[in-house]
Amino acid sequence: YTPYQPEVSQGVLQATYEFQTMVALLTGLDVANASLYDGASALAEATHMAVGQTGRQNVVIAGALHPEYAQVLQTYSDAQGYDIVRVNPGSDGRVDSHRLKEALSESTAAVILQQPNFYGVIEDPQPVVDLAHGAGALAIACIDPISVGLLKSPGDYGADLAVGDGQPLGIPLSFGGPYLGFIACRETLMRGAWSVARLTVRDAGASCSPFRLASSTSAGRTPLRTSPPTTH
C-alpha cells in the first residue's frame, strides 16, 4: 500500500514517485497510481471508475481480452451491478469495427481494448477509441508495458485510462507471483482512481529536498490513528 507518512521513509516515497512517473511516461497519460494487486484487478477498478464517471451501466469488451481478466471483470460487475457486452474479434483476430459500432449505445460507459490482444495480434486502437468517444464512453487500454517501447502509448491514440501488469518489467516468477497492477488516467479522472498519491519535492534550502504528499485520492487511504487501538 502507498505510504502517506513522509517522515517515515523518504526512500520508499522516492521509489513511489519514480514508479508513478515512469508509468505515466510509458502510458502517455497524466497520472498513475502505486499500485494494485495485479493487472486483472487494475482493469476491474478502471472499469468501475468509468461506470462512476459516466453514470452508465454497460461495458464493452472489444476483441480478444485475456479470459482470466474477463473472469475477474465479471466478478466485479456481478457485485457492482453493471453489464458486460462481449464483441468477438473478426476472422483476422482483430476488433471488428462494425460489430463494435452495433454494440455501442447511450448506456455504454467504457470500451476495453487489449493491446496486443490475447492472441498476440497487434490491434489498430485508433478506430476503437474514436468509436468509444463517439458514443460518449471512455476508452480503456489494457497493455503490456514493454510493448509501448515499440507501439504507440495509450495517450497517443486518445485512451482515457490505461491498465496493465507490472510483472513484464522484470519481476521474476515465483510459483505464480508476485504481480502488480497499475492504472494511469487523464487528470480529469484522477479523483476516481485508486491509491493515487501525488508526491512533490520541497526545497527548504537543505542539502537534500524531502518528498511530501501534495495530493491523494481518498480511495484506499487509511487515516492515521490518533489513539491506541482497542483489543478484544
Image (tube, rainbow, N blue to C red):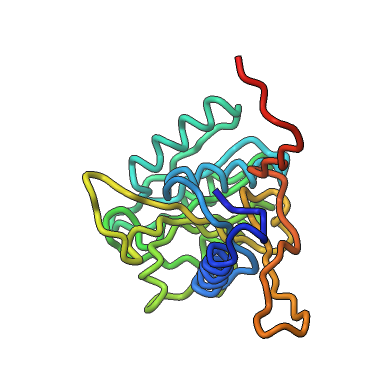
Extreme residue in the left direction: 175
Please indicate whether residue 228 sits to the left or right of residue 149 in the image: right
Extreme residue in the top direction: 232
Above-or-below relation of 135 to 205: above
Residue in the image at 43% along x and 67% along y: 124
Instruction: Give the percent coordinates (x, y) of residue 30.
Output: 65, 69
Residue 120 visible at all: yes
Above-or-below relation of 104 to 10: above
Instruction: Give the percent coordinates (x, y) of residue 131.
Output: 58, 58
Q: Quadrant of residue 211?
A: bottom right
Extreme residue in the front direction: 228
Instruction: Give the percent coordinates (x, y) of residue 24.
Output: 56, 69
Please indicate whether residue 105 sits to the left or right of residue 117 in the image: right
Q: Report the label total.
A: 0
Residue in the image at 71% along x and 55% along y: 216
Residue in the image at 75% along x and 64% along y: 214
Residue in the image at 43% along x and 45% along y: 40
Q: Quadrant of residue 198?
A: bottom right
* Residue sitting nearer the eye, 196 or 188: 196
* Residue sitting nearer the eye, 67 or 223: 223
Above-or-below relation of 27 to 172: below
